[in-house]
Image (tube, helix red, strand yellow):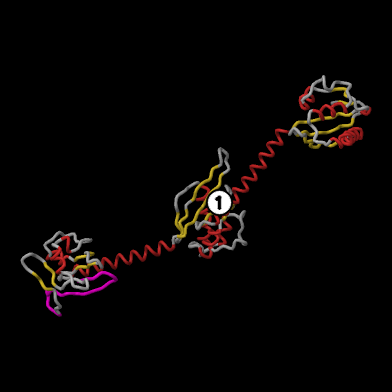
Amino acid sequence: MLLDASLNAQVINRAFYDIWKIGPADVSVGSPFRALMDVNRHNGVYDVAEHQWEGYVASRLAEIKAGDVAPRELARRDGCTMIYSVTALSGGQRLVCYYDVTEMKNREADLAEAKDKAAELFSNLRRMVDSMSIGIVVLDADLKTEIINQAFYDLWRIDRLEITEGSMFRDLMEASRGIDAHGMADAEWQAHIANRETELRSGRTEIARAGTLRRPRHDLQHGAAAWRQILVSYVDITDMKDRETELADALEKSKLAEAVINGVRDPVFVKDSELKFVFANRAFSTCWPRPRSYVGKSDRDFFSDGEAMRSRLPNGRCSRRAKLSNSRRIRISPAPTGPGSCARTAYRRRAARIM
């Protein structure tokens, strides 16, 4: 809108009418600027109380007469937002401009809301990641750290105050050099760092092992953009490896014990607290004319209840007499010496009994 020195309209363009949602019948060329404000007031544009209206109009008119007005936001009660400015022209004329930025402001509001939600999600993610026992570090495409959880610091014995998020991955490696398997000779160490950086940048996702840490790597892609993040996780499997070693030792000892017992020419078997077979050596399997699979079975699986009860003592232990067939009995009794002699050997291990 172009105003003369008396602030009467000289030119009003179509965009002006569209912005204020009025027509030439409401405000036409020659109308005072005050007329525009009165029309807009009745259209509910201004959020100004009744007793403040005249003062508000006087301040606006005085501002326009004073000269240039720098662009500023003008919020309307109907939810629209304008950028308002005044430019002083020769002869006391004024050019009053309005630019509708409502859509832009709405996008800004949406963006601010999205940022708040993203900040909340990131905060929740940080709490969740820090509560995990898996060491996690998220890197950007330049191998700069974005997220480092507490488990990562603990696994590599790094001071969180010394190496913060935003540091390079190389800085993390330098800080943990004292416990890294490759941290001895300088040449070996620098080659190790270079290999790790090359591996991370190459896009390989294979699982690597360093000492007792299991390290898988994953790429985090973001849409079609070239922006890429790398998630590297470390799992401490030291306890599991120790248990594997202990289990392997126990199995070797078990195999040795089984071989020794199988080498004995006298029948030897093991029963649990319920008198079910746990193990029987080859000599026992040879002299007992029954199926070779005894594990988990008791005397009742081979004999009648009466015969099975006769092989039990009152205290639940097996009788010294073992019925080997319907036609003969062999008494297993102590025999100090002599090859092939049948010796009764009592050996207890927890609830099992070796007879």
Residue at 66% across / 40% down in the picture? Answer: 111
Q: Is residue 354 magenta?
A: yes
Circle 1: residue type: Val
- Quarter holding the N terminus is top right
**Left or right of 352 in this view: 302:** left
Q: Is residue 176 left or right of residue 39?
A: left
Q: Which residue is label 1 attached to?
A: 138
Magenta segment boundaries in residue numbering = 336-355
Q: Quadrant of the C terminus?
A: bottom left
Q: Residue furthest top?
A: 25
- Considering only vertical position in the picture, is 196 above or below 39? below
* Residues packed near mark 1 inside 10 Å, few (<14), some (14 to 19) or many (20 plus): many
**Residue at 50 percent of width and 58 percent of height:** 133
Q: Residue 279, image x and y in percent?
A: 22, 65
Q: Tell me what residue is drawn at x 45 percent, y 54 percent.
A: 208
User: Based on the displayed image, in which of its 4 quarters is residue 228 positioned?
Assistant: top right
